[in-house]
Amino acid sequence: MENYVITIARGFGSGGKEIGKMLSKELGIPCYENQILEMASDYSGIDKDEFMQVDEKLRGTYISNWLEKVPILKNAVPMESEFVSDLHLFQIQAEIIRDLAMTQSCIIVGKCADHVLRNFNNVISVYIEAPRHACVDRICKRLNVTPKRAEELIKKTDKYRYEYYKCYAGGDWRNPINYDFTLNSDRIGWERCVELIKQYVTIRFGIDTEHSEDESEE
């Protein structure tokens, strides 16, 4: 196999982004999250702030209301310019993600990447979550906020991600069927999450992940 991709979906506070970065170092391949927004901006000429505003969330309350009526929003043809703009921004990001999957080995965090790359044979999709108390504790320490505020941030962010995925992928972002496997980062720890994903890369693609980092540094 010339290249492979690992997509990571994650609950807010579960450590999924950090696990992606650790995995990147172990495997010697890049990890993309917000870099996708920069690449989409460079590719399209659209200001990065536009992509930041729709980063795994929807703009406009009317869009959220539509979700009850339209299971897969991409099949609808609304007239609101804001919606058309958001859909266009998503399509640009999706094009960047598909291009990465065809040209290099990498890790992609969030961005509906598991759905965008659902028809690619060189992709492993992982969902990382943790119990609420562990996510609250981590957000409190990382952002220096109260447990109450951490709880609010988790609910808000996960709601954004749920609606975003439902809008563009037409399903539930937390459905385990969307992924090769799910991991409880609190139960086994970040390091073991990394090791398990590396082992699965070997099982799935027959790649020796134990020497990937050394080879990339030669």
Image (cartoon, rainbow, N blue to C red):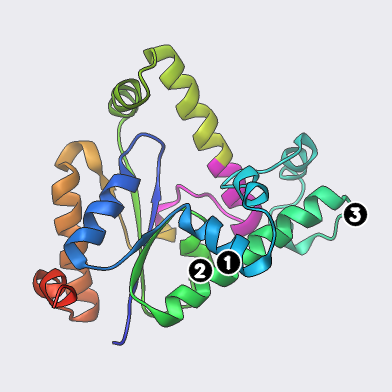
- Horizontal and vertical percent position of residue 36: 50, 60
- Per the model, the C-alpha gap separating discs 3 and 1 is 22 Å
- Horizontal and vertical percent position of residue 201: 22, 71
Q: On the image, numbered disc 2 is attached to which residue?
A: 97
Q: On the image, numbered disc 3 is attached to which residue?
A: 79
- Do the residues bearing badges 2 and 3 touch, measured as CB atoms within 8 Å? no
Residue segment shown in magenta: 161-176
Res 60 → quadrant: top right
Residue 173 located within the stretch drawn in magenta: yes
Classify the position of the C terminus by image quarter. bottom left
Ranked by sequence position, the earlier of labels 3 and 1 is: 3
Res 94 → quadrant: bottom right
- Residue at image location 34% in from the left, 47% down from the top: 17
- Name the main secondary structure of what is drawn in magenta: helix
Res 31 → quadrant: bottom left
Q: Is residue 6 visible?
A: no
Q: Is residue 102 visible?
A: yes
Q: Amino acid at mark 1?
A: Ala
Q: Say what secondary structure mark 3 lies in.
A: loop
- Horizontal and vertical percent position of residue 104: 37, 78
Pointer 2: residues within 10 angstroms few (<14), some, or many (20+)?
many
